[in-house]
Image (spheres, grey):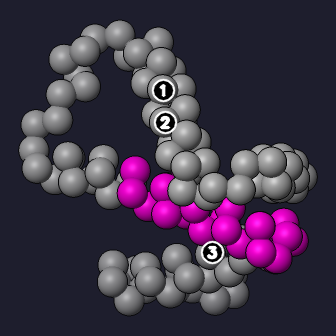
Amino acid sequence: MNLHITYCKQVHVTASYPDHLSLTAWACLMAALQSGILTFILEPNTKTWKLTSPLQLFSCLYAGLVSAVTFFGQAWCIARRGPLFSAMFNPLFTVIVTVLGCIFLHEELYVGR
């Protein structure tokens, strides 16, 4: 239900703001600000915010890039085909993550109980 509401809101925003790249930049900026404020409330000690390794910096940049690409792809798909077409791929993401986890992370796949 919550996913349906999100896509419906995204349809209205995409219809009134047709530039998907700019919309993606604004959405990511707002998400970063909200996350920063929430993180500061939950963890006010700024020493814990320091990135101490290149892997931590890479992980932050990768997460931001993937989020932006995902939002851009959804906005483009909704503009082209509508919200139902974009929403029907969410169950497929679970299958894709499971298969990639088995291949790259050598996780065991259990079928059944």
Residue for point 32% across, 57% down? 62
Question: What's the distance in space between the residues labelled 3 and 2, CA to CA?
Answer: 27 Å
CA neighbours of label 1 inside 10 A, class few (<14), some (14 to 19), many (20+): few
Q: Between tags 3 and 1, which lies in front?
A: 1
- State which region is magenta: 64-86
Q: Is mark 2 on a helix, strand or loop?
A: helix
Q: For mark 1, what is the residue? A: 33
Looking at the image, residue 59 lies above or below residue 38:
below
Question: What's the residue type where badge 3 is placed?
Answer: Thr
Q: Where is residue 10 in the image (x, y as percent from the top left)?
A: 78, 51
Q: Position of residue 38 (x, y in %)?
A: 50, 21
Q: Is residue 75 magenta?
A: yes
Q: Is residue 61 magenta?
A: no
Q: Between tags 2 and 1, which lies in front?
A: 2
Q: For mark 3, what is the residue? A: 94
Q: Is the Cβ of the residue at disc 2 closer than 8 Å to that at disc 1?
A: yes
The residue closer to the viewer here, 46 or 104, is 46
Q: Is the Cβ of the residue at disc 3 closer than 8 Å to that at disc 1?
A: no
Question: What's the residue type where badge 1 is placed?
Answer: Leu
Question: What's the residue type where badge 2 is placed?
Answer: Leu
The residue closer to the viewer here, 100 or 4, is 4
Q: Is mark 3 on a helix, strand or loop?
A: helix
Q: Which of marks 3 and 2 is nearer the N terminus?
A: 2
Q: Earlier in the sequence, mark 3 or mark 1?
A: 1
